[in-house]
Image (spheres, grey):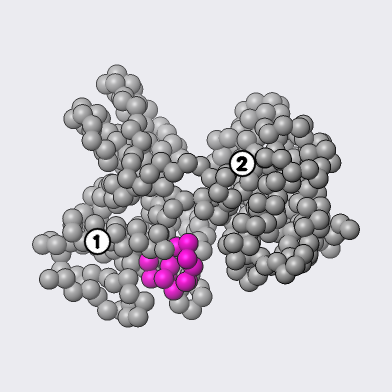
Amino acid sequence: MAVPLGPAARRRVRVATALMDYIAAINEGQGKVTIPADRIIAKNAEGQNAAVTLEEIGSFIERMTQAGKLTNVEVMPDSYAFRIVRKPLTMRSHAKAGTSQSPGIGQIMRVVLAAVDAGAKHHAAVRSAVSKALALPVRTTARHVSEHSFEDRLALCIEQHKSLGYIQREGRAISILPRGHARLQDNRPFEGDEIPKKYRRPDKGPNTVRQLPAVNARDANRLLQTIPTLPPERLIVLWSNAVKVLSVASGTAEHERARKVLDAVETAWDALDKKRDDEFAWPSTEVRGHSGTLTVPAFRSEGMLSYLEYRVGKTASLPAVLRQSILARVFEGRLPRVFDAEYMRAWGSPASAQRLRKMAESLAAFARNGKRSGVERLEEAIRQWEQDLEFLYERYYVGRFGFGWPTTSINDPGRMLVHR
């Protein structure tokens, strides 16, 4: 017997319906669409009208992007903007049969966990709740198992949640575990090692960087001329690509062009006007301190490095040479003025003791928080944080600075490491 959707799942369906209707009403088949937060109304669990929040819009856009329906997503302080890949359908419409209309495996992983959290206690109930939440027509959820069928993906997702320690099965009964409930509150997409193995992307190897196509001198000069007029989201793409070029062995001319792009982007960053502090929303993160809360300095350090696309862990797939190329430029170059003035002052000037100390203390804090969490999947991230901390020590600290170098030990985090 099917179990009705829980309050959270009902709210998600109502939000998705309202957003799809909004997109269908304002989209004329092309161009950018902007969805503002707190202006679109959908009923809550009690049947009362409630504004759709920025977080709810973000979750909806994540699902639609994974389904291949949206592209060029931009996140702003109070809205999301994107382009439609194909003409949007309302949630009341049935998706056509075929893999192009099928929900992504990461999306199914999240909805399965939400269904169990909402009270679905056996396979049939989970199946019913998931198909309703994803608005799948009956014919696409028929009870036959074939490779890549809905039933096949559903079964794999349930087993994967069990192996991750998010749910437990006792006979036919399914229930959520505290770890699963906590993961559900996290808005990160399910990807990498969290999804069933057959749906993971092939590993390109930990020590390789994709060689970017060469840019000729004429194109480079044209690009340099346009950089001062580009928005911040385009500047960070150019900055990241240039850092990648500098991280791999290539011709002197290509390296020189990459350095010119970096200088031009950082000059454009200097010209950015920071909005008022109360208009800026700090990004969320799952890393928590010893007391279970995350301090504002930790929030902001994560924000700067994350903005500059520094990532660690298995799912990030950034080789050490690229991570350390990013860190090198963060230390030596100018930083984007997309944060408030007080926060920017904490990072100091390029190649200064203050800048290096800020970076070192941030990486050490991330590693300590990862160790305190006791989460097994963070082991690779912790190893990479410590590896990058050693890189900063060897390359920039030795023989130049004398401040105490931070430790990643959780037994005595106040003690500074002493290197001979």
Q: Looking at this view, is 403 or 321 the one in front?
A: 321
- How many neighbours does mark 1 have within 10 angstroms: few (below 14), some (14-19), or many (20 or more)? some
Is 153 included in the stretch rendered in magenta? no
Which amino acid type is shown beneath numbered disc 1? Glu
Q: Give the quadrant of residue 96.
A: top right
- How many neighbours does mark 2 have within 10 angstroms: few (below 14), some (14-19), or many (20 or more)? some
Say which element carries label 2: helix
Q: Residue furthest bottom?
A: 412
Q: CA distance from mark 2 to mark 1?
A: 37 Å
Residue 105 pos. (x, y %):
63, 46
Is 372 included in the stretch rendered in magenta? yes
Q: Quadrant of the C terminus?
A: bottom left
Against 346, residue 90 (above or below) is above
Q: Looking at this view, is 187 or 403 the one in front?
A: 187
Q: Provide the residue designation for mark 1.
A: 390
Q: Give the quadrant of residue 97.
A: top right
Q: Mark yes or no: residue 280 visible.
A: yes
Say which element carries label 1: helix
Q: Provide the residue designation for mark 2.
A: 66
Residue occupying image coordinates x 44% and y 74%: 372
Which amino acid type is shown beneath numbered disc 2? Gln
Over which residues does the magenta segment extend? 367-378
Q: Is residue 161 left or right of residue 149?
A: left
N-terminal of the pair, mark 2 or mark 1, is 2
Q: Quadrant of the N terminus?
A: bottom right
Against 98, residue 311 (above or below) is below
Q: Mark yes or no: residue 10 visible.
A: no
Residue occupying image coordinates x 84% and y 63%: 46
Q: Is residue 300 left or right of residue 7?
A: left
Q: Give the quadrant of residue 232.
A: top left
